[in-house]
Image: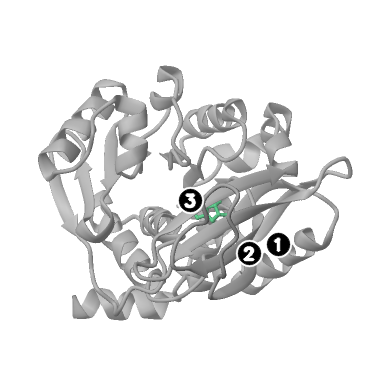
Amino acid sequence: MRTDIVILGVFVADTAYRAERQPRMGETIMGNSFVLGPGGKGSNQSVAAARAGGNVHFVTRLGMDDFAIMARKTWEEAGVTPVVTDDPDSYTGAAYIFIEEASGDNAIIISPGAAARISVADVEAQAALIGGAAVFVTQLEQPMDAAERALGIARQGGARTILNPAPAAQVPQSMLELCEFVTPNETEAEGIVGVTVKTLDDAAAAAARFRERGVSAPIITLGERGAYYDDGETAELVPAMSAGPVVETTGAGDAFNGGFSVALAEGMKPLEAVRFGCATAAISVTRPGTAPSMPARSEIEALLKSS
Ligand code: RIB
């Protein structure tokens, strides 16, 4: 049985500022705290999956600098196998993260640096790994043509494919058809299929639109409400779980995708895997940071048992 999870994506250093609000243009305001830590959606998902018990390979591109050292240390500690193209002509990227003190909600600017240069050739060089995986996952922080090629290789090789279409972007039809699962949040779903998602009925309508466009089983993530799953036969809301007070929601989507991919790779049914992903996300939001907030397998199992 295949067990490997291969994730294509971006590592960046997260620079996280907590403040009451964002500054207006031309204004300086005082923040409450600053933390520098590992981030990038693909890297966060890799860390989440590895900590949840997955055998994870992360395909990316790094500069040759201090942030690249941070990346490698993060993966080593989590047990992620790096598959890295070193790029001496660029830098390892960074993200500005504003965290609203009252809610823990966030707003992000990301500059992926070297990872913005991930190419179709980089992906084709890893065709055997990607095609031989149990589960392949990617997002939209690296170039779209590389993501689409990797999804094509994964699909052809018989891997299960997950596209986390974040940040929000237009996704071509040809790419959606390569996805067994997509995991957009409300904004990303609206950006791709044009349905504004506010209610559960809206989520159902958005999911139906994804299926019309060739996705086998869309999963619309709905924050504190949970995740709406629809494979054409089963359509239901998997309610969010609570693991304590919410400290920071940054990286919750990454936790969901990491947990979901591990459960799928272990052969759980998709709905059960969505529940596993929801538990992973529920714990991550009770802690600050993105990659550092990802829970261990034992914590996920304990929450699933008590929920
Ligand atoms: O999903 C959260 C991540 O988005 C952050 O770690 C930040 O780096 C951006 O990529």
Q: Is 155 in front, or is 67?
A: 67
Mark closer to the observer (1, 2): 2
Residue at image mark 3: 2
Q: Say which element carries label 2.
A: strand
In the rendered image, residue 232, in percent from the top left (x then y), is placed at 16, 33
Q: Where's the C terminus, which quadrant?
A: bottom left
Mark closer to the observer (1, 3): 1
- Mark pair 1, 2: CA separation: 7 Å
* Residue at x 35%, y 74% (from the top left corner): 300
Can residue 194 be seen? yes
Numbered circle sitting on residue 71: 1
Residue 127's place in the image compared with 68, above or below, is: above
Residue contact between numbered discs 1 and 3, judged by CB atoms under 8 Å? no
Residue contact between numbered discs 1 and 2, judged by CB atoms under 8 Å? yes
| Label 3, ligand 1: CB separation under 8 Å | no
Residue contact between numbered discs 3 and 2, judged by CB atoms under 8 Å? no
Residue 165's place in the image compared with 58, above or below, is: above
Residue furthest toward the front? 26
Numbered circle sitting on residue 303: none
